[in-house]
Amino acid sequence: MFMNNFEYFAPKTPGEAFELVGRLGKKAKILAGGTDLVILMKDKIVSPECLIDITNIEEFEGIKYEPGKGMVIGATTKNSEVQYSEIVKEKYYALAYAAGEIGSSQVRHMGTIGGNSCNASPSGETPTPLVALGAKVIVSSAAGDREMPLEDFITGVRRIDLKEGEILTKFVLPEPAPKSASRYAYMGARDANEIDCVNMAVNIELEADNQTVKSVRLVMGSVFVRPLVSAAVPALLNGKKFSDELVEKAAEAAQGEAKPITDIRASEEYRHTIVGVLARRLLKEAFAAAQEV
Amino acid sequence: MKQLISLEINGHEYDVPVSPRDVLADVIRKKVGLTGTKKGCGMGDCGACTVLVEDKPVLSCITLAITCNGKKVTTVEGLTLPDGQLNPLQAAFVNHGAIQCGFCTPGMLMSASGLLKRTPKPTLYDIKHEMSGNICRCTGFKRIIGAIELASEAMSKGVK
Ligand SMILES: Cc1cc2nc3c(=O)[nH]c(=O)nc-3n(C[C@H](O)[C@H](O)[C@H](O)COP(=O)(O)OP(=O)(O)OC[C@H]3O[C@@H](n4cnc5c(N)ncnc54)[C@H](O)[C@@H]3O)c2cc1C
């Protein structure tokens, strides 16, 4: 329960932060809300010599939306801010909902959206909708910025494409297509402070006829080492008129792609079944919502 | 190496020497001497240690005190009105029988305070959703929810 001692740094500007992260290298860990890191330190799973707290840097924080262009969410934006933001709810519903389902009110007021992706737990709440919404991440260092899709940034269980000296600074979300809607759902043992056994997000865009699927993105969480973007579901649905039979086929196809494991939270078989349940539900919900846009 | 940090706890300034690893719950209880804040699980799951930092509910058992340097902290002791009376939320907990053993109560009150600051008239769903990180082992949730509803009503009528 007691952490090792460490040195604490609280840079106030991006420049100071990049200098520290670059100079201290492997000796240091970046600290955002601490809701993952402090737990790991208390359990003595990690014992860094230094912590670099990046939550006092204004430039890394906040939600900015520009009509027609999309949204930029700073990495240290609290999950509760994403949950409560009216513009996130309106434009990127799946993300606002997912952020609101993390842990508990306290955990959401502490933890950051950047920390959720950097922690790279396969059951993490927000990477799934972010990937479904086409989010890109910006990772920055003294040398400049790199940009990549979030699904490429998360490379495996607790593994991310972050090089020494880099900090994840932003998520960039494209403006949603005109007739589109996104939805998120998860399954777990209880609602609060538990870890999802499967989560999923769907982002669907319709043609002007309100029936034909122009494009769909279905992303699964907790059934692979990182967010799993379905290739089969768009192949089945894009360009087709939405129907219950097609939804059945799409749900089966998603089940075929998922690679769940058995662990303390659920069996492989149960997860497999739940992928079908959530895919059916979300495709229908997102379709109905897109018709209303 | 200890560092001096300054915390504004319940309206009073405290300068406290802390090690970077000291968690806020220990600093409040052992260094400042306010023992209303409870330590339950120590891992963020039970909510007993909830305090407000800048009016937002956080878990003081997994918050490094040093990250709160210069910030405003409210603990359960800070809820009481200046004349020593219970505030409407505390009064509602007492009057509605929302307390059994009492161990979870400070955390419940602080989470509920955070909720009512943000959402003065919460729905039943809001209350359940935003209070779900506070566990009561006596399982008195129904009365806790009821007390928060009563407090919200009283406060909307201007009861201080
Ligand atoms: C009781 C409890 C319940 C929880 N329930 C859920 C849940 O239901 N769903 C869920 O998804 N998560 C849950 N979590 C986990 C956690 O709250 C989230 O993952 C949160 O978003 C992490 O953010 P943070 O700011 O606290 O990260 P930190 O703990 O500060 O950091 C996590 C990791 O990411 C690194 N990091 C953080 N920010 C950056 C950055 N900008 N650039 C580079 N590296 C960075 C850190 O070095 C560290 O390795 C829970 C945690 C607790 C304690």
Image (cartoon, coloured by chain):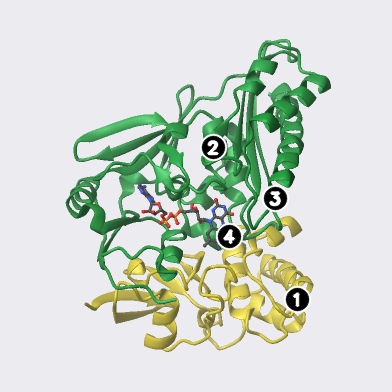
Chain colours: A green, B yellow
Of pointers 2 and 3, the one earlier in the residue sequence: 2
* Mark 3: secondary structure: loop
Which residue corresponds to mark 4?
A105
The residue that mark 2 highlights is A227
Assess disc 4: are there few (<14), some (14-19) or many (≥20) residues with their C-alpha within 10 Å of its C-alpha. Answer: many
Residue at horizontal 32%, vertical 48%?
A58
Looking at the image, do the residues carrying marks 1 and 2 touch, with CB atoms under 8 Å apart? no
**Front in this rendered view, residue B123 or A236:** A236
The percent coordinates of residue A163 (x first, y second) are 28, 41
Q: Earlier in the sequence, mark 4 or mark 3?
A: 4
Specify whether disc 4 shares its chain with disc 3.
yes
- The disc label shown at residue A267, or none: 3
Q: Nearer the viewer, residue B145 or A168?
A: A168
User: In the picture, residue A199 is in which quadrant?
Assistant: top right
Residue B6 shown left or right of residue A257 in the figure: left
Q: Nearer the viewer, mark 2 or mark 4?
A: 2
Q: Secondary structure at mark 4?
A: helix
Chain of the residue under label 2? A
Q: Which residue is mark 1?
A: B139
Q: Give the residue drawn at x 38%, y 39%.
A: A170
Chain letter for mark 1 = B
Rendered location of residue A210, percent (x, y) = 73, 15
Three-letter code for the amino acid on which mark 4 is drawn: Ser
Asked which secondary structure carries label 2, the reply is loop
Q: CA distance from mark 3 to mark 1?
A: 30 Å
Residues A26 and B48: in front is: A26
Q: Kindly tell me whether mark 1's CB lies below 8 Å from ligand 1.
A: no
Give the amino acid at mark 2.
Answer: Pro
User: How far apart are the two marked residues, 2 and 4, measured between alpha carbons?
Assistant: 25 Å
Nearest-to-viewer mark from 4 and 1: 1
